[in-house]
Amino acid sequence: MTFELPALSYSHSALAERGMSQETLELHHDKHHLAYVTALNGFVEGNAALQGKTLEEIIALSYGDDALAGVFNQAGQHWNHIHFWNALSPNGGGIPGTLEAKLVESFGSVEGFKAAFKTAATTQFGSGWAWLIQKADGSLGVTKTPNGVNPLATGEGTALLGLDVWEHSYYVDFRNRRPDYVSNFLDTLANYEFAEGNLA
Ligand code: MN3
């Protein structure tokens, strides 16, 4: 199986007015994400045990295996970025009713959710991700993961909404101001319909 870079469902300039520039999407999607896909395909080509496996299967079998750490990094980042492009929207920021009720139930309020997510995203030291997840008991939670790790790999829960906090995701538009990038995501870029659609 050869993995491919999925096309964005919006134009590279579609998010510019909402704080994610065409330059960022050209670099982040066309260069960074493509590099993960290319590297992953290289690993698969050189390792018969990975051939014919789905992306999720490769993530599961490589996570926590030191000998497959390179494979995991590329596979995790491919999965994370597929998720991330769907987590952004040119019409983002609005929270549909079913998700809003779940957020209030788990965090006390939408603001409580945003505060928890922002804390996770800004305290992830170095590269990584912040996630809104649904746990096994159905409740929602917020977590953060380093590098290419995700809640699918750790088994913490189902990823509803993930935010890339690697510097390449915000340095063009926000320079070193990660907190502003996170707030902008939560308020104007996040595709909460996608998050709601990921609920069990
Ligand atoms: Mn990235």
Image (cartoon, grey):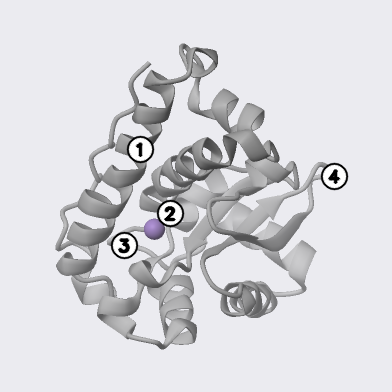
- Residue underneath mark 2: 87
Q: Amino acid at mark 1?
A: Ala
Q: Position of residue 170 (x, y in %)?
A: 35, 74
Tell us which disc is closer to us: 4 or 1.
1
Q: Residue drawn at (63%, 79%), measured in percent from left and top?
A: 123
Q: Amino acid at mark 3?
A: Asn
Which sits earlier in the primary sequence, circle 2 or circle 1?
1
Which sits earlier in the primary sequence, circle 2 or circle 4?
2
Tell us which disc is closer to us: 1 or 3.
1
Q: Is residue 169 found left or right of 145 in the rendered image?
A: left
Q: CA distance from mark 4 to mark 1?
A: 36 Å
Q: Residue drawn at (69%, 63%), measured in percent from left and top?
A: 142
> Is residue 113 at all visible to an observer of this figure?
yes
What kind of element bears circle 3? Answer: loop
- Disc 4 crowd, CA 10 A, few/some/many (<14, 14-19, 20+): few
The quadrant of the picture occupied by the N terminus is: top left
Tell us which disc is closer to us: 2 or 1.
1
Q: Nearer the viewer, residue 131 or 149?
A: 149
Q: Is mark 4 within 8 Å of ligand 1?
A: no
Residue 184, quarter of picture: bottom left
Q: Is residue 59 above or below residue 179?
A: above
Residue 6, quarter of picture: top left
Q: CA distance from mark 2 to mark 1?
A: 24 Å
- Residue underneath mark 4: 137
Q: CA distance from mark 3 to mark 2?
A: 11 Å
- Disc 1 crowd, CA 10 A, few/some/many (<14, 14-19, 20+): some
| Label at residue 39 | 1
Asked whether the beta carbons under mark 1 and mark 3 sit within 8 Å of each other, the answer is: no
| Label at residue 91 | 3
Tell us which disc is closer to us: 3 or 2.
2
Which sits earlier in the primary sequence, circle 4 or circle 1?
1
